[in-house]
Amino acid sequence: MPDEIYTYLHDHLKKAMETDTFRSLVARGNFEVNYMDGPAFGKAMQGMSNAIASALNK
């Protein structure tokens, strides 16, 4: 993905996640907001994938 598109999406999605409207919707669903940039999200997803694979292999 070109850097300018990544930056645009990153900046606008982060800004949207910080709005009261978004936080209200998330709270109604009993979720938490935990913003992560691309590398942090990738690491979190890899950890979740490893945990699921481990649980399925037991």
Image: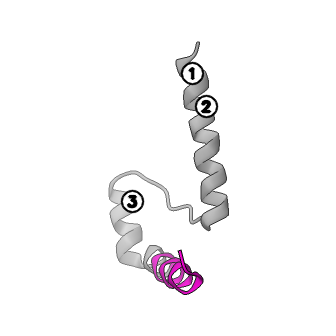
| Between marks 2 and 3 in the image, the one whose residue lies nearer the viewer | 2
Q: Amino acid at mark 3?
A: Ala
Q: Residue furthest front?
A: 2
Q: Which mark is residue 51?
A: 2
Q: Is residue 16 above or below residue 57?
A: below
Q: Amino acid at mark 1?
A: Ala
How many angstroms separate mark 2 from mark 3 (CA)? 26 Å
Q: Position of residue 31 (x, y in %)?
A: 43, 53
Q: Nearer the viewer, residue 28 or 57?
A: 57
Residue under label 1: 55
Q: Position of residue 34 (x, y in %)?
A: 56, 61
Q: For the point 50% across and 82% down, which residue is it?
A: 5
Q: For the point 35% across and 75% down, which residue is it?
A: 21
Q: Is residue 28 left or right of residue 4?
A: left
How many other residues sit within 10 Å of disc 1, few (<14), some (14-19) or many (≥20)?
Answer: few
Dominant secondary structure of the residues highlighted in magenta in the image: helix
Q: Nearer the viewer, residue 13 or 39?
A: 39
Q: Amino acid at mark 2?
A: Ala
Q: Which mark is residue 23?
A: none
Q: Is residue 6 above or below residue 45?
A: below
Q: Is residue 22 above or below residue 54?
A: below
- Which tag, 1 or 3, sits closer to the chain's start? 3
Q: Nearer the viewer, residue 6 or 47?
A: 6
Q: Which mark is residue 27?
A: 3
| Magenta region, residue range | 1-14
Q: Quadrant of residue 50?
A: top right
Q: For the point 48% across and 77% down, which residue is it?
A: 18
Q: Residue furthest top?
A: 58
Question: Is 55 a magenta residue?
Answer: no
